[in-house]
Image (cartoon, rainbow, N blue to C red):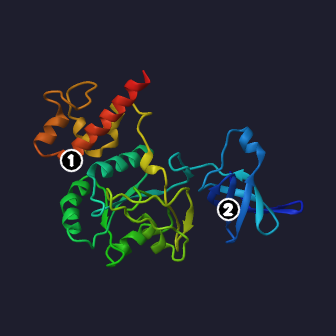
Amino acid sequence: MELSGERVGVHFRMRGKIVRAVSGFYYVQTDTGATLQCRARGIFKKRGVKPLVGDRVNVEAQGTKEGVIVEIAPRVNELTRPSIANVDQVFVVLSLIEPELSLYQLDKMIAMVEEQNLPLLLVLTKAELPGAIEVFQQIEPVYRAMHYEMIALSLRAGMGSERLTAHLKNKTTVLAGLSGVGKSTILRFVVPGADVAVGSISEKGLRGKHTTTFVELYQTEHGFIADSPGFSQYSFESLEPDQIQYLFRDVKSEALHCAFRGCLHETEDGCAVRNACEEGRLAATRYASYRQILQEVKDAKNRRY
């Protein structure tokens, strides 16, 4: 369906993108630059269709500030956590220091994005802090070998900012990561003047205080970007245990050489994946992350039956 602006009776239909959804209201940024507070036509509810942030829509304007969503263009893709449509890429954001980088969290979030079949960029923040670059230099080769691009970012020191903004051009980007790792700081950098709350780090446990509670798209100079509350709560419970290996590029590659049919690459003697880990071709940290997620999926399956 091709959306287009046209006059219908006394109303004018405008094309736009939903940039925010709160309590049944949808805020649509039109192609002319205006923002309208909209409701959706009842026909969408009858069809079981819910408008999402990121949707391209036709809006029937009612005055200069309000409107009604009358058409939704077909979606390229749709995420459930967060609820957002038409995403081009995901930035996986974690801090190198404060809080200390968890390779399990990093691998879990990579697997989440792989399951959604979306391109990703690894953004590791707080690179200016003592010891941070050493951490980056230790892990970057592991992920580069799997063709993941990784940026060491310090907006305070101006490190990595040009590479970050270059990746935003003509894209709709979702930031994924735990609170307190610098996502809001990134948003404020790429969208100057944006009303974004910045979380602080609690001394107890060094975990970020939650600040963002809904999805909102912000327009950058060349695209759109959104924080993603809920992404870190994503689970793999809907998957079968034998599907997890396909979310780990390195495990999947080694599994091609496994002689055991239906192997989950855990404890089997002679398993090609286990051998790769023992011989150093597969990073032990990556194998540990795979085993942990696999066990979580198996436990979830056992609870269902």
Quick check: can you spot residue 252?
Answer: no
Foreground pick, 240 / 246: 240
**Which residue is at 40% across, 46% downward?**
112
Amino acid marked by disc 1: Thr
The crowd level at tag 1 (other Cα within 10 Å; few <14, some 14-19, many 20+) is: some
Residue 257 pos. (x, y %): 20, 34
Residue 288 pos. (x, y %): 22, 42
Amino acid marked by disc 2: Val
- Can you identify the residue that label 1 sits on? 285
Residue 100 pos. (x, y %): 27, 59
User: Mark 1 and mark 2: span between their CA atoms?
Assistant: 44 Å
Secondary structure under badge 1? helix
Foreground pick, 190 / 116: 190
77 vs 41, left or right, is: left
The crowd level at tag 2 (other Cα within 10 Å; few <14, some 14-19, many 20+) is: many
Residue extending farthest to the right is 9
Pointer 1 or 2: first along the chain: 2
76 vs 257, left or right, is: right
227 vs 51, left or right, is: left
**Which residue is at 28% across, 38% downward?**
292
190 above or below 287? below
65 above or below 54? below
Quadrant where the C terminus is found in the figure: top left
Residue 266 lies in quadrant: top left
Residue extending farthest to the left is 279
**Which residue is at 52% across, 71% downward?**
222
